[in-house]
Amino acid sequence: MEPVIVTSKAHLREAVSDAVESAMKRAAAAKDEPLANRKEWLTNREAQSYLGLSKATLARYRASGRLPYSKLGNAVYYRLADVEALLDSHTVASSEAS
């Protein structure tokens, strides 16, 4: 049986508020630090998220040579610079973006 902890509403609100504030500070600090300063290589999942692509599309980019990668065992890694170069190569002029 789980122990019962008795506290006041005010104390509980303060504890929750402190926890939320701490989490928000950690999230803001991580967001403010550029990805390039944190990592040089991205995992397959990180590259998918960074590019907003499905796993299948990323696999097609690898297979076609559009995105260089490294493979260590079953794990696939992408250089952040290569991922950003792929984005740069698909930059659309503002007049074409409509």
Image: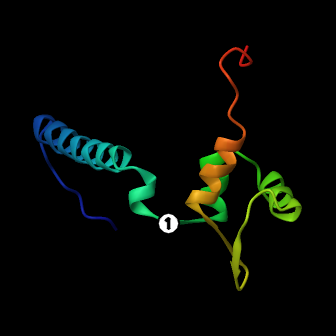
Q: Nearer the viewer, residue 65 or 16?
A: 65
User: Quadrant where the N terminus lies?
Assistant: bottom left
Q: Which residue is mark 1?
A: 40
Report the residue at 67% width, 53% height from top: 48
Where is 40 relative to 21, above or below?
Answer: below
Give the image location of residue 96, x and y in percent. Answer: 74, 18
Q: Nearer the viewer, residue 80 or 12?
A: 80
Callout 1: SS: loop
Left or right for 38, reference 53: left
Q: Amino acid at mark 1?
A: Glu
Q: Nearer the viewer, residue 6 or 40?
A: 40
Q: Is residue 68 visible?
A: yes
Left or right for 71, reference 15: right
Where is 3 relative to 86, above or below?
Answer: below
Mark 1 crowd level (few <14, some 14–19, many ≥20, 10 Å Cα): few
Left or right for 97, reference 42: right
Give the image location of residue 41, x and y in percent. Answer: 55, 67
Residue farthest bottom in this picture: 73
Report the residue at 72% width, 38% height from top: 90
Give the image location of residue 15, x and y in percent. Answer: 17, 45
Query: Number of callouts in the render?
Result: 1
Give the image location of residue 83, x and y in percent. Answer: 64, 54
Q: Quadrant of residue 69?
A: bottom right
Query: Which colour style is shown?
Result: rainbow
Q: Is residue 49 visible?
A: no
User: Quadrant where the C terminus lies?
Assistant: top right
